[in-house]
């Protein structure tokens, strides 16, 4: 009888434990992707990116003599139907660590097992499973550097695995048509523009990793904070959808470390930030919705989504150049440089004193690399209420950051076309063509005046913090 392999955020053939184990059995394998409630709830850009990824992965499976069966609906019900239709006796998948998936997977595994179906889950999305990493006292790590030291030399699970040899079933179950799901429909600005900046699929991810290791890793430590430089790996969306395994990135970067590559250590440490985010969310499932540090309950942030200041921030017209450039970069490309993510988040939560959850939600709408754990950790870290957070009074000054990391203005001039003589720039122009008219932005218009003075915003943020502390 066939084995169903339930694919989720792991759209790859290499290093895929569930597919590998299923193929090793020599039995027919039916890879399935289910468009369930969690998929339907995704923001516009991640959903659009998922559609691209699914299309590419379905193609890779066909090249490997297999097929991706697509089904819409509640995962438990869909799996039941497929088991009935195909006579499968086993369902395999790779584990996820966010609270929604953990709850769903636990339920499904118990149901299937009760009915005599062999339900097996495997690790594969992380280097170290969160439940396995404990402090000396048996607790969980709350500080990144201690977590990093604990896992630095630890053997990773699983290692790199070969592409599986997939046996087809005698008949394939019916599949939905991907286009009918309309996953890209919410990308009003047109996927075409984001697509110019997006590479999709396992092959692209593997090529990107090789190219990065060969040509850019050596300069990574020095240049990774400069937003105008293509110095980072840009693997995040591939990692988010599992088009490449973190095990492969880790193993090859570790080899580079051993041969003395000067950027390898920094890159490995960044991979561990992703790991730490997943670890934290598993241990603190409230991280995406509530302040992580209990002593931050009761701190007041403005939560009005209709506040004009918040809207100006989302639309990249706060009048603060580095902030606006970042917000526009995200809108146009689906990603934003890491340093700029920190700056726009600090500006929103401190200068504008808007709630970090609003920013987190807007990122979830716009990022093609959206990952529930990294996004939540990033926002809470910047806002000051998160694990190992930068202290609240550390307010990034966007102007000094600009001088430091974009001294020649290459990044801001790239994204802000208004009266900069850069309106001929393709990205800037396509940006202006793509944005809704209601945003009132155009290359001919004057660049907006600051909605809040940086000095006043900072003073007000620190005063609010002092007030709250004194009332506690
Ligand atoms: P590289 O510098 O090449 O790093 C390699 C990989 O390490 C990345 O692909 C990523 O998987 C991981 N990584 C690097 N930095 C971090 C970090 N600070 N936290 C977690 N993982 C990291 N990353 C996401 O993948 N999805 C998100 O939704 C997300 N939201 C964020 C929100 C905020 C407010 C902040 C400050 C950061 C967020 N990040 C998020 C982390 C980081 O900005 C991106 O992972 C990084 O910019 C991706 O670019 P890259 O692949 O070129 O990174």
Image (tube, rainbow, N blue to C red):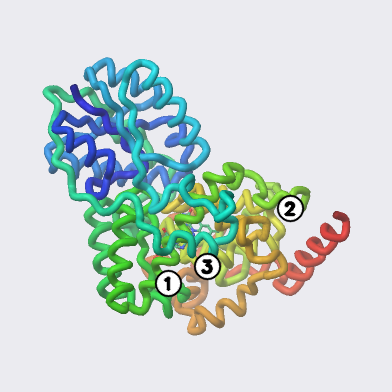
Measure how far apart labels 2 and 3 are at the Cα level: 25 Å
Residue sitting nearer the eye, 369 or 438 = 369
Tell me if 397 is positioned left or right of 88 in this view: right
Element under disc 2: helix
Residue 386: x and y, percent?
A: 63, 56
Q: Quadrant of residue 440?
A: bottom right
Q: Earlier in the sequence, mark 2 or mark 3?
A: 2
Instruction: For marks 3 and 1, give the one nearer the viewer.
Output: 1
Which comes sooner in the sequence, label 3 or label 1?
Answer: 1
Question: Is the residue marked by circle 2 packed among few (<14), some (14-19), or many (20+) residues within 10 Å?
Answer: some
* Residue at 80%, 61% in the rendered image: 464
- Structural distance between the alpha carbons of marks 2 and 1: 31 Å
Q: Residues within 10 Å of mark 1 (few under 14, many from 20)?
A: some
Q: Nearer the viewer, residue 464 or 133?
A: 133
Q: In the image, what residue occupies the spot 71% across and 58% down?
A: 353
Q: Secondary structure under badge 3?
A: helix
Residue 156, image x, y percentages: 35, 55
User: Which sits in the foreground, 333 or 13?
Assistant: 13
Instruction: Say whether disc 2 or disc 1 marks the residue closer to the N-terminus.
Output: 1
Residue picked out by circle 3: 340
Q: Which residue is mark 1?
A: 266
The residue lying at 72 percent from left, 68 percent from top is 393
- Cβ of mark 1 under 8 Å from ligand 1: the answer is no
Would you name the residue on which mark 2 appears? 296
Q: How far apart, in angstroms, are the residues tagged by discs 3 and 1? A: 18 Å
Residue 175 is at least partly visible in this image: yes
- Discs 2, 3 touching: Cβ within 8 Å: no
User: Which type of secondary structure does the marked residue at label 1 adopt?
Assistant: helix
Q: Residue furthest front?
A: 137
Q: Which x, y percent locates residue 119?
A: 34, 27
> Furthest residue to the bottom?
408
């Amino acid at each position: 009888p066939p084995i169903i392999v339930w694919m989720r955020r792991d759209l790859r053939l290499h290093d895929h434990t569930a597919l590998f184990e299923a193929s090793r059995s020599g039995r027919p394998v039916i890879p399935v992707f289910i468009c369930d409630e969690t998929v339907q709830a995704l923001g516009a850009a991640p959903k659009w990116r998922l559609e691209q990824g699914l299309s590419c992965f379905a193609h890779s499976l066909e090249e490997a003599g297999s097929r991706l069966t697509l089904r819409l609906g509640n995962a438990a019900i869909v799996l039941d139907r497929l088991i009935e239709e195909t006579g499968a006796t086993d369902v395999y998948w790779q584990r996820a660590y966010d609270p929604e998936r953990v709850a769903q997977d636990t339920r499904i595994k118990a149901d299937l097992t009760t009915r005599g179906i062999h339900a097996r889950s495997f690790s594969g999305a992380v280097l170290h499973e969160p439940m396995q990493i404990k402090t000396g006292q048996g607790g969980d790590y709350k500080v990144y550097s201690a977590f990093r030291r604990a896992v630095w030399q630890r053997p990773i699970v699983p290692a790199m695995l070969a592409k599986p040899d997939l046996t087809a079933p005698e008949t394939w179950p019916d599949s939905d048509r991907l286009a009918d799901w309309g996953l890209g429909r919410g990308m009003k600005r047109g996927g075409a523009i984001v697509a110019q900046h997006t590479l999709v699929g396992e092959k692209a991810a593997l090529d990107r990793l090789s190219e990065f290791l060969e040509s850019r890793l050596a300069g990574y430590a020095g240049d990774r904070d400069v937003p105008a430089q293509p110095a980072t790996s840009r693997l995040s969306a591939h990692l988010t959808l599992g088009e490449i395994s973190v095990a492969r990135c880790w193993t090859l970067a570790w080899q580079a470390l051993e041969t003395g590559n000067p950027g390898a250590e920094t890159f490995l440490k960044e991979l561990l930030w992703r790991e730490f985010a997943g670890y934290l969310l598993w241990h603190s499932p409230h991280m995406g919705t509530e302040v992580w540090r209990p002593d931050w309950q009761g701190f007041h942030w403005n939560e009005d989504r209709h506040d004009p200041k918040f809207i100006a921030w989302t639309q990249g017209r706060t009048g603060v150049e580095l902030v606006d450039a970042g917000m526009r970069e995200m809108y146009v490309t689906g990603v934003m440089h890491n340093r700029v993510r920190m700056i726009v988040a600090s500006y929103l939560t401190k200068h504008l004193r808007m709630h970090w959850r609003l920013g987190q939600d807007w990122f979830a709408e716009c990022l093609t690399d959206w990952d529930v754990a990294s996004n939540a950790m990033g926002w809470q870290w910047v806002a000051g209420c998160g694990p190992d957070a930068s202290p609240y009074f550390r307010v990034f000054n966007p102007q000094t950051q600009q001088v430091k990391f974009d001294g020649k203005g290459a990044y801001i001039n790239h994204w802000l076309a208004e009266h900069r003589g850069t309106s001929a720039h393709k990205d800037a122009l396509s940006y202006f063509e793509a944005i809704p008219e209601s945003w009132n932005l155009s290359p001919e218009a004057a660049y907006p005046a600051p909605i809040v003075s940086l000095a006043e915003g900072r003073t007000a943020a620190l005063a609010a913090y002092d007030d709250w502390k004194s009332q506690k």
